Amino acid sequence: MSAASQALRTAKRTGREIELVVVERGSWTSYSACGIPYWVAGDVPEVDDLVARSPEEHRSHGLDVRMGTEATEIDVGARVVHIRELATGVTQRLPFDQLVVGTGAVPIRPDLPGVWADGVHGLQTLDDGQALLDTLTSQRQPRRAVVVGAGYIGVEVAEACCRRGLETTVVDLAPEPMTTLDPDMGARVRQAMEAMGVQVRTSTAVEGFVVGDDGWVTGVQAGGEVLPADLVVLGIGVRPNTALAREAGLPLGVSGGLRVDRRQAVLGHEGIWAAGDCVESFDRVGQTWVHVPLGTHANKQGRVLGTNLAGGYDTFPGVVRTAISKVCDLEIARTGLGEADAEELGFRVAVGTVESHTTAGYMPGAGAMTVKVVAERRTGRMLGAQIVGAGPGAGKRIDSCALALWNGMSAGDLAMTDLAYAPPFSPVWDPVQIAARKAAEAAKRP
Amino acid sequence: MSAASQALRTAKRTGREIELVVVERGSWTSYSACGIPYWVAGDVPEVDDLVARSPEEHRSHGLDVRMGTEATEIDVGARVVHIRELATGVTQRLPFDQLVVGTGAVPIRPDLPGVWADGVHGLQTLDDGQALLDTLTSQRQPRRAVVVGAGYIGVEVAEACCRRGLETTVVDLAPEPMTTLDPDMGARVRQAMEAMGVQVRTSTAVEGFVVGDDGWVTGVQAGGEVLPADLVVLGIGVRPNTALAREAGLPLGVSGGLRVDRRQAVLGHEGIWAAGDCVESFDRVGQTWVHVPLGTHANKQGRVLGTNLAGGYDTFPGVVRTAISKVCDLEIARTGLGEADAEELGFRVAVGTVESHTTAGYMPGAGAMTVKVVAERRTGRMLGAQIVGAGPGAGKRIDSCALALWNGMSAGDLAMTDLAYAPPFSPVWDPVQIAARKAAEAAKRP
């Protein structure tokens, strides 16, 4: 919808005539999927709070929005999309001059016994959120939740369940939660989750789901035992929803995401565009194409795409893989490459880690925070950073590291930049700068 | 002390013999002057909390620290410093191979009738802080405070007085408080101060101080009337404490600060060094030398200086004039050039201002924040940014702008960078990025 809206704005400015048809299988437009865990937790009271613009509002801006309608085939040669209205089964051929693929991502549902049982929830769409809320508030009065997957969604949902008073267990195959962090930083997330009463079962494979006679899940078979469960949430991650694009012969990368150029044009297919969770983005640090499903990239890519589609020129400059989340008061953030990522790409790394505070240590409420900076040996170039610390004020410091990566700065340079200092906001050296200085020193050692 | 400590560390690493004598007029070493307002406010319970390292601790690391001792003359030709012990009047000649000038800054005390009366406080040293606390808790039971100057110190002290239950009035000559912000942003600070019950008298000149028969201040003569006062705090600012350096013939800039090179060597005087509030620093944006008295620069410059003094090589890369403060929950931050600063330096500017939130708008406790970005017309290069907004999470976002300035980024580039997004931390476009995008668009207009 970001692309469509921007295309309309650009067309208006350049005086072009443009007719835009939007086909959406679901019943919602322009909503914050990232906000769903906070709606489930009860922080966000109404589902409408998550909706930025309804189909009606989009229509009032001149978009032809077809809800409850599925695209079933893209005929690239004939420049036609086949669509079908779900309620009626009526099909139609939509000819196009230009096409935007914004099919997003789909949650991964492992092919395990019982995975489709009642009470086993995914959590990607508003409808998924409503279903989970219905279960939580149902007459079954669930007491025990098992969350499969300890990534962003898994961790956020675990907090939501815990705060709603459920006995909550998180299961993950990896040795520590949050595998987008290095294990030493992930261990700190585990501690925080355990401190809030969440059971964390890591290095544990889920083998299946135990289902009761009424078709409702009663347990999760994992690591050779059964974890009792009145409800299960799958937070294993998502993959690009590109089946339609693949069938149409559009180019996909190793992640399964669509390959696009910097204008968000699908490679080799002038007039076909793609943006959001269904594409790969260029990682400026690793210089590889990666799948980073995140609303902020989708929104920016959509805007770029919309400008280009309507005859303007704009480019998406890539990502550095910045991400942030929280578990209760613990803020978790990362950017760039972790140690293992970097080594896999052939970098030799040096690390600086510091335990410091969000404010001057003598201020009341100074939050403990850990910053880890990964730099390239010899050059000292910043490769990545990770932060785990007590909020407020720990996590968003990752932005300084993200901008250092963006500009190809060395860790030593970042250490000497002019970041905001006053006792309620930072120690006299920002924790990020201390970690960067340590990484720079480590990078120089033979 | 940062310079001395780093010189010792460097000498140890390089195997040099070095004998370091530190001469300090006062009775404290290595303390956080920036923390004094929070001690006065009662946030920091003990003065010792503000002291990072006592004279004894420094001595145990091998420094010859002479407290209560004043340097009275620098004889550059003879390479001798004349010192005098304040308590005994005993004088001594200290020959040196290398000299560090770290004389800091002195608060400006306007030459007005009554300015030396009892109850009129400066606030720069720990002794100043103790004197103000003594007045606040004295048997006089002061009820009405007048703060002269609405800059960082003035605003922070006004909050402290207000929170201690005093009727508090701030007087300043400028049309809005915080002249390091543009007036449109300063007006928001005024609103916040007034909302917390502080009277703000701007565009008002202080003409003198009314003194009672007992020598104690009873009022402030300002703008043609008398503002009753049981105590007065001067927060007019500081100037480099360089009288000794000037008499010695060392080079000073227009601000009165010592002129140094990137190694913190005093220009034209090999083996004489200076750092901290007594020097000028290079402003990377304006490409001018400026006086920015701030602990974080002093600390970094000292470290650089110490390395160089002991035979190593390090450089201070300059500043972009980042600063941050708060008044109750309102966070105030700035970096780079304001509109007027920029125009004075010959820039033609474009501005982008946005009202947004610290988190996704639908999250509970989303704080309202205003960001203003100043960019150069035509090139769109970032020149500065200012933030006024509800904490937590508003002010420290200035670091993203500071790093954009540091790297010479355009506002349009900043708008498309990969900053951390999740609903508890940011709208889908960070407020800083929306303001930058608006500034970039404005810069393109003819």
Image (spheres, coloured by chain):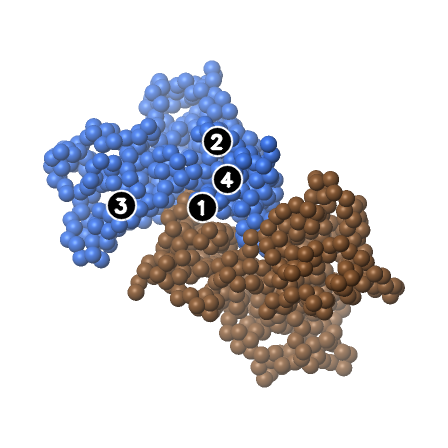
Chain colours: A brown, B blue
Does residue B361 appear anywhere in the picture? Answer: no
Count neighbours of disc 2 (C-alpha within 10 A) and say few if under 14, some if 14 to 19, many if 20 or more.
some
Q: How much space separates mark 3 and mark 1, taking CA atoms? A: 24 Å
Q: Nearer the viewer, residue B366 or A27?
A: A27
Residue type, label 1 = Asn
Marks 4,3: beta carbons within 8 A: no
Q: How much space separates mark 1 and mark 2, taking CA atoms? A: 18 Å
Label 1: which secondary element: loop
Q: How much space separates mark 2 and mark 4, taking CA atoms? A: 11 Å
Label 3: which secondary element: helix
Asked if labels 3 and 1 share a chain, the reply is yes
Residue bearing mark 4: B381
The disc label shown at residue B48, or none: none
Label 2: which secondary element: loop
Q: Quadrant of the C terminus of chain A?
A: bottom left
Residue bearing mark 2: B347
Return the chain for callout 1.
Answer: B
